[in-house]
Amino acid sequence: MRILQGLIFLALWMLGSTSYASGDNESCEPLQDALSPTEYLRALSLDLRGELPSLDDLQAVEASGQVDPAMIESMMETPEFAWQVVELHRTLLWPYIDHQNFYPMALKQDWDTRLYYRQTGVVHWPEVYGRGGENVRCRDEPEPDPTNIQPIENPDGTVQEGWTCVTPYFEIWNDTWLDSDDDCPLGQIKVCAYDAQEALVSPNNGLSCTSAVPNPDPGCGCGPNMRHCAKSKQFHSAILESYDRSVHWMVANNRPYHEMFSEAPLFVNGPMTSYLTYFAPDLPFSTAILPDLNYLDDEDTWVALPSEPAWTGVLNHLVYRLRFMSNRARVARFYKAFLCSPFQPPVGALPPATDEAMQEPDLQKRPGCKYCHSTIEPAAAYWGTWGEYRPRYLNAEDYPDYDPECHDCALAGTCGERCVQQYVTAANIPEAVPYLGFLNAYLFLAEEHQVNISGGTQLLVEKTLLDGRLPDCAVRNFAIWLMGRDLLPDEESWLETLSDVFAASDYDVKSLVYAIVTSDFYRRVL
Amino acid sequence: MRGAWTVRWLLMWGLLGACDQTLEPSNASIPGTAEEGVNVAHAPDKTLSEPILRVSSEGAFQQRKVAAITASGEAEENAKEIPSETESRGTVGLEPEVWDSNAFTRPRRRMTVKQLDRAIRLATGGIGWDDSDQNSGSVWVDLEATLGVPDFFRRVQVDLDPGMTFHKFLGDGANVVCTNLINHEQNIAADKRVFLVHLPPGTNPLDDPAATDANIKMLLLRFHGKSVELGSPQLQPWRNLVNTIAANAGPWWGDWLEAWTGMCVALLKHPNFYSY
């Protein structure tokens, strides 16, 4: 009975609330099951261009009562649309390279003296620059004759030279106080004399001073205009933008979506050209194909290099390879982000680490691990011609599939860095012995999968395009982006329809996006 | 008895709320899809006299439309013209067993920080939240990490949560931008103004209600994409805001401009601005 009384009271109270609400109802916005034309335009403009529509466009739609399809198409022809697609792909490709110190000749400026010098420490050896001690810089005095450096010997055995003025290739403050504490003319910086040396070949041992891997000889400096040295992260923004431009190229040039992965050209500007010319080791192309771009003047000039399947496309881009440093990581990201197939073993599939079967060295066979690695290992071979953990292309001339030297040194236990890093040299694992001397990508790789190494990522893209996984996942990614949430089981059939549209348009991103944003689904907002 | 009370309770619950609305039945469908011609989940018949609640399979109320179909698959219009007898093939549900009530509806989404920065600049004719002290450009750029912009290393997903931190900084930004905007509008020609378009800064909004309404209508369109008719009750809250602040503004000439500053802040902090 009390419950009944409570319900009656609650009902009366709600009726009162209702009548109050009804009285205020007219000033409330009406609920609607679809966006009004002007709100629809606003949503379209924010999604397709990243900005609000102009008042003129809003008033035109307000007057006509509808968004003209031509208006949507024109939005997708703007440069902003291509950059919106780039933004989407940043969330899939995860561009980040700050964790990598992939050009080792890091210049540093001591703020108190304004002296520029090459850092010593983890990357560089104390003896490299002739001073004989870690973190020993030059004296804050001019070196009388930089072509004949006469350092002063200290009681602790270290030596210190003086400084000299240099016009660097990179951007400086162009303020004599900030750049050199008023010690050098405008446009020049104060550099320790050892580091300012211009020799291209060491006078001490005749070795090159211009290799991407630094020559640790005291006779080698930073070269003319310091061009072989760079400040920390100096090229990062250019390299990241080059990555973005590979995605942008696909949209702006109306290319099929899949071409972004393995065919989009490599874009270079002034700083990027400088990096590739002086700092990048083992490039897959000759630096002769690089355009003549100036570091300072051509920061905003972007040139597409001639395409070559072995190294074009975002999956081969430096940023992808640095962000995902191992071939397994490269596979994992591609499968999750672009095939919508994350690697996840079944619950309880992994046996305890103490299980004897866990000693199986081939992950394609090891219990538990095999659920993912039977796919990962063959797929990792698509990146088999790229080095892991360093930006290095393993060209066939310098890195043949099989190197007898690496085989022999593995057995003798005398392998150097080249063999250890790029070849199978683990002679202590009996199962690995047949693979000794082969590139790492060949380890435990079945014969039928060896074609993946030569086919590269282009083969991976072709296969996943043909089996539909790549375009289907792209449809899902674009739908999630524009709908702002994961799709529900009830909506899966809609994705199939979109996939048909996408395929019929030869994987044209604009056709796909048009189909999504003109659906009732897009206009129906809660 | 209990069931009847439950139904009445639910009926009343449906009526509760400051802005109660009745959704009209919709025949909307997803064109070109397998669902074509089938009412989608968002558009149930929600007349109050016959509530239909679509809930999960565990739910208590799952009203299904059931129809008999004939051998030809169509309803018989004139039984006399068809000599054969109707052959029953049983009953079939016209709707799936389980509808997700959110299917085929898009949730409102907060702008990204970059969109917000650009949207504010476009709505205000170029005035953004810039750090004038350090001459370092947009404050929004400085706040990216705080507001959930991923660096794709430590954070890999975009956080679009319109939470307290977001609102704190949106409010801070709106206060700066709107103050600068109204100051700027006082010093430029009429054809350059983007905020005070239908009445000049020198006119107290209380003195020209028609121009004030026209200006509010324009601002709702510019900032929120809302098309509101002049005379619509939807203008009332905004008109009240402007008039109340103007009426309580200081005694000096031009103090009424506080009303437009307040209007600007309210527009920017409204969900209709920062989400879509």
Image (spheres, coloured by chain):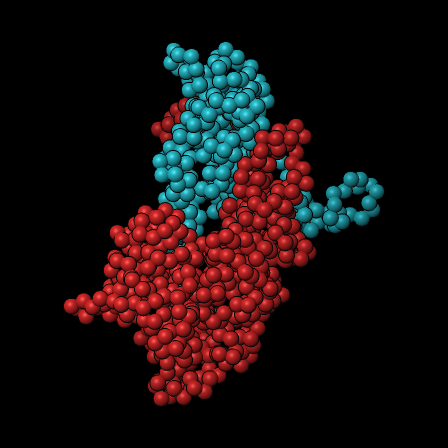
Image height check: is B134 above or below A491?
A: above
Give the residue drawn at x 40%, y 29%.
B175
Image height check: is A401 above or below B143?
A: below
List x then y, in percent, for residue B17: 46, 27
Q: Colour of chain B?
A: cyan
List x then y, in percent, for residue A24: 49, 20
Spot the red chain and give its letter: A
| Left or right: A169, with A50 as reference point | left
User: In this rendering, does residue A288 appear at all?
Assistant: yes
Q: Nearer the viewer, residue A380 or A100?
A: A100
List x then y, in percent, for residue A515: 64, 47
Image height check: is B197 above or below A131?
A: above
List x then y, in percent, for residue A34: 59, 36
Q: Nearer the viewer, residue A291 or A334?
A: A291
Give the residue drawn at x 57%, y 23%.
B191
Looking at this view, name the residue that lies furthest to the front: A144
